[in-house]
Image (spheres, rainbow, N blue to C red):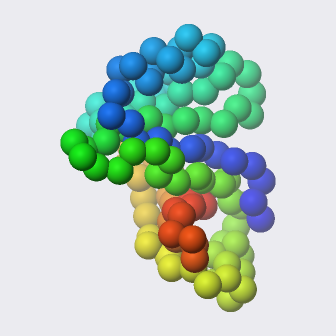
């Protein structure tokens, strides 16, 4: 079952400028992950959506890379596979830096989505 939006992953060309902008908007740094080239930020308070900001490669994709939903249980993957025409890019991939597992899929529009525990 999906319980909330967990995070929104952004690829940006101006990493430092984006971090400053988000701080000016009132967000705080939750976690810095230099080995991933990213930082996680959110507004203060409980149950705020986290934004993970990554530097984009020169000339690479910029924008929303994916939106991740908090998922409880494994029925979501089975239901999505059964009822939707999507391509799973990963299933249960462990992200070493956060300790969470993610399953990433692409919808028929070419948009990337994630389920995370």
| Image-based side of 117 in relation to 110, left or right | right
Measured along the vertical axis of the image, is residue 20 above or below residue 36?
A: above
Position of the N terminus, as image quadrant, is bottom right
Measured along the vertical axis of the image, is residue 59 above or below residue 17?
A: below
Residue at figure coordinates x 72%, y 86% from the top left:
83
Q: Residue farthest to the top?
A: 24
Nearer to me, 104 or 15 = 15
Q: Is residue 105 visible?
A: no
Q: Position of residue 92 (x, y in %)?
A: 49, 67
Nearer to me, 102 or 50 = 50
Q: Residue farthest to the bottom?
A: 82
Q: Residue farthest to the front?
A: 59
Position of the C terminus, as image quadrant, is bottom right
Q: Quadrant of residue 50?
A: top right
Measured along the vertical axis of the image, is residue 110 above or below residue 101?
A: below
Residue at figure coordinates x 59%, y 44% from the top left:
7
Q: Position of residue 89 (x, y in %)?
A: 44, 73
Q: Position of residue 90 (x, y in %)?
A: 44, 70
Residue at figure coordinates x 39%, y 19% from the top left:
17
């Amino acid at each position: 079952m999906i319980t909330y939006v967990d995070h929104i992953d952004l690829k940006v060309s101006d990493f430092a400028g984006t971090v400053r902008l988000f701080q000016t908007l009132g967000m705080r740094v939750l976690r810095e992950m230099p080995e991933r080239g990213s930082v996680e930020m959110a507004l203060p308070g409980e149950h705020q959506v986290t934004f993970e900001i990554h530097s984009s490669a020169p000339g690479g994709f910029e924008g929303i890379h994916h939106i991740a939903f908090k998922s409880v249980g494994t029925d979501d993957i089975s239901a999505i596979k059964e009822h939707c025409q999507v391509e799973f890019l990963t299933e249960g991939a462990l992200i070493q830096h956060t300790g969470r597992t993610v399953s990433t899929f692409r919808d028929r529009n070419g948009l990337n989505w994630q389920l995370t525990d």
